[in-house]
């Protein structure tokens, strides 16, 4: 520590002074670094206006990282009004200088249609360049494209490869997405322990999605004991990062006193904030709010509002919103019944990877709703749904094996999938597994186990279980 013009300087402040002098002399890297200091409050008071000023100087002096960060300020409205056109302009300049971060952000512009028409092919191309240039977030985005078939054919193996690279390069979101792959066996052998570890790493690195998924693990007792206090803690952190599904969960925790004391005021605040997310066009928020109106969760049940919100979510590309919109058309919730439209939206949902949508599309092919009956296609979609962990799809796949719908009869496989459906809490899975034990379908007869399962099914509203119990008890 020493004195400079009556100012006591430590190493950090000396570097700041030297950077400031270089910046004023026109050094674009120093201008960028000074802008970063003001943006993040490193050694100075955070000031987005000054960050904008210095990034502008750096960008206009041709420094690619300065151009990228200037684009970020315009995209987010930090120190200026939001301007997607200017963001696109500066990201383009940065990307043209082979800046990996600029390529990733320009890819986002094409993906979301910000400042340019949506173009998934161009988004993929830019993510690929960014990833190959070593940007961890670009690697994560490339993995996302391969996982969901965005601008490229779906390839779960490549998705895992790029999520793995992103995670190893310290990307918290990449760790979360790799955890999702291990959780559901996407492109990798299912390993819930690894999923939990990756969610934990992601959460502790500050990733809102990782915090949400870790909260779910504690809430549902996945790999760990149920711990509502920890679930609340992680939902709270995630919600504070602006992740709207956590905002919804947090509101429920406050409403019912899960992991915290009942706090009606906070529950209402969460609900209002979540509604604001939906109003601003967030497809996940629109879906979750639609779900609340469909089932009367925290609001009066209103199928019309549910339909409108699902419609918005579906058209904004969210696969679960597409599935539930299909459900509205299938059952006439908030709209007239229309099996063709139901089939159309289930198809979109299924193609976008929604396990529930895949199950419902299989159901359409099985029953001939909105399309011709096709047991083979029903079997194919039930298989995809079941392998992704959808309990209803697992039960339906078991039924296909039992009855020989779209495949050869195979009682052992029927038992296997009924068991999975039952373990995942599907009421019909309880019933059908009970029948397997009752009649020796794919397993040895076990009347005691059959009675337990029939009673579970009955508790969940499966009335046919009564008849089977009566046969055993000879009423």
Image (cartoon, grey):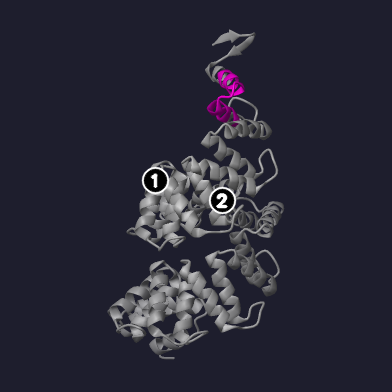
Q: Earlier in the sequence, mark 2 or mark 1?
A: 1
Q: Image quadrant for the C terminus? A: bottom left
Give the residue displayed 37% in from the left and 78% down from the top: 398
In whole angstroms, how far apart are the C-alphas of marks 2 and 1? 34 Å
Q: Secondary structure at mark 1?
A: helix
- Asked whether the residues under the numbered discs 2 and 1 touch, taking CB atoms below 8 Å apart as contact, a structural biologist would say no
Residue visible at 54% across and 74% down in the picture? 345
Q: In the image shown, does 81 or 282 lie closer to the viewer?
A: 81
Q: Is residue 360 left or right of residue 254?
A: left
Report if residue 467 lies within the magenta region: no
Which span of residues is magenta-colored?
17-35
Q: Which residue is mark 2?
A: 235
Q: Position of residue 197 (x, y in %)?
A: 40, 48
Q: Is residue 339 left or right of residue 199?
A: right
Q: Residue at x 66, y 35 (%)?
A: 48
Using residue 82 as the reference point, say whether residue 371 is left or right of it: left
**Magenta-drawn stretch, dominant element (helix, strand or loop):** helix
Residue 300 position, x and y percent, is: 71, 69
In the depicted view, which residue is nearer to us: 77 or 406? 77
Residue at image mark 1: 132
The answer to which image quadrant residue 25 occupies is top right
Q: Is 465 situated above or below 273?
A: below
Residue 47, picture quadrant:
top right
Does residue 77 appear anywhere in the picture? yes
- Residue 204 numbered tag: none
């Amino acid at each position: 520590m020493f004195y400079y013009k009556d100012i006591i300087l430590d190493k950090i402040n000396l570097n700041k002074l030297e950077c400031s002098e270089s910046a004023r002399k026109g050094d674009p890297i120093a201008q960028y670094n000074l802008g970063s200091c003001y943006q993040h409050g490193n050694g100075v008071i955070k000031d987005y206006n000054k960050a904008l000023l210095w990034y502008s100087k750096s960008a206009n002096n041709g420094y690619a990282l300065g151009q990228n960060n200037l684009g970020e300020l315009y995209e987010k409205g930090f120190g200026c009004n939001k301007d997607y056109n200017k963001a696109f302009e500066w990201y383009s300049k940065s990307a043209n200088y082979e800046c990996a971060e600029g390529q990733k952000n320009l890819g986002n512009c094409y993906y979301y249609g910000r400042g340019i028409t949506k173009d998934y092919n161009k988004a993929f191309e830019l993510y690929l360049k960014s990833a190959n240039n070593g940007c961890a977030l670009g690697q994560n985005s490339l993995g996302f494209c391969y996982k969901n078939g965005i601008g490229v054919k779906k390839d779960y193996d490549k998705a895992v490869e790029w999520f793995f690279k992103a995670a190893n390069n310290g990307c918290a979101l990449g760790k979360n997405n790799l955890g999702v792959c291990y959780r559901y066996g996407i492109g990798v052998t299912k390993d819930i322990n690894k999923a939990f570890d990756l969610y934990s790493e992601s959460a502790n690195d500050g990733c809102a999605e990782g915090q949400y998924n870790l909260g779910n693990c504690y809430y549902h007792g996945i790999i760990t004991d149920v711990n509502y206090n920890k679930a609340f803690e992680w939902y709270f952190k995630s919600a504070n990062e602006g992740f709207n599904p956590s905002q919804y969960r947090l509101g429920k925790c406050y409403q019912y006193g899960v992991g915290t004391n009942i706090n009606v005021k906070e529950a209402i605040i969460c609900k209002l904030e979540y509604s604001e997310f939906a109003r601003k066009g967030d497809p996940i928020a629109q879906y979750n709010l639609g779900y609340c109106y469909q089932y009367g969760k925290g609001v009066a049940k209103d199928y019309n509002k549910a339909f409108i919100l699902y419609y918005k979510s579906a058209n904004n590309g969210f696969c679960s919103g597409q599935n539930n919109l299909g459900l509205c058309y299938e059952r006439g919730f908030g709209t007239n019944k229309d099996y063709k439209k139901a089939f159309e939206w289930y198809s979109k949902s299924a193609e976008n990877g929604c396990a529930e949508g895949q199950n419902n599309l299989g159901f359409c092919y099985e029953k001939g709703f909105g399309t011709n009956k096709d047991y083979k296609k029903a079997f194919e979609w039930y298989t995809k749904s079941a392998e992704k962990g959808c309990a209803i799809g697992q039960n339906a796949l078991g039924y296909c094996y039992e009855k020989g719908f779209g495949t050869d009869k195979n009682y052992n496989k029927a038992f296997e999938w009924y068991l999975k459906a039952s373990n995942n809490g599907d009421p019909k899975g309880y019933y059908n597994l009970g029948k397997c034990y009752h009649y020796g379908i794919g397993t040895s007869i076990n009347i005691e186990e059959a009675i337990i399962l029939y009673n579970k099914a009955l508790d969940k509203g499966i009335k046919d279980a009564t008849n089977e119990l009566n046969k055993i008890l000879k009423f």
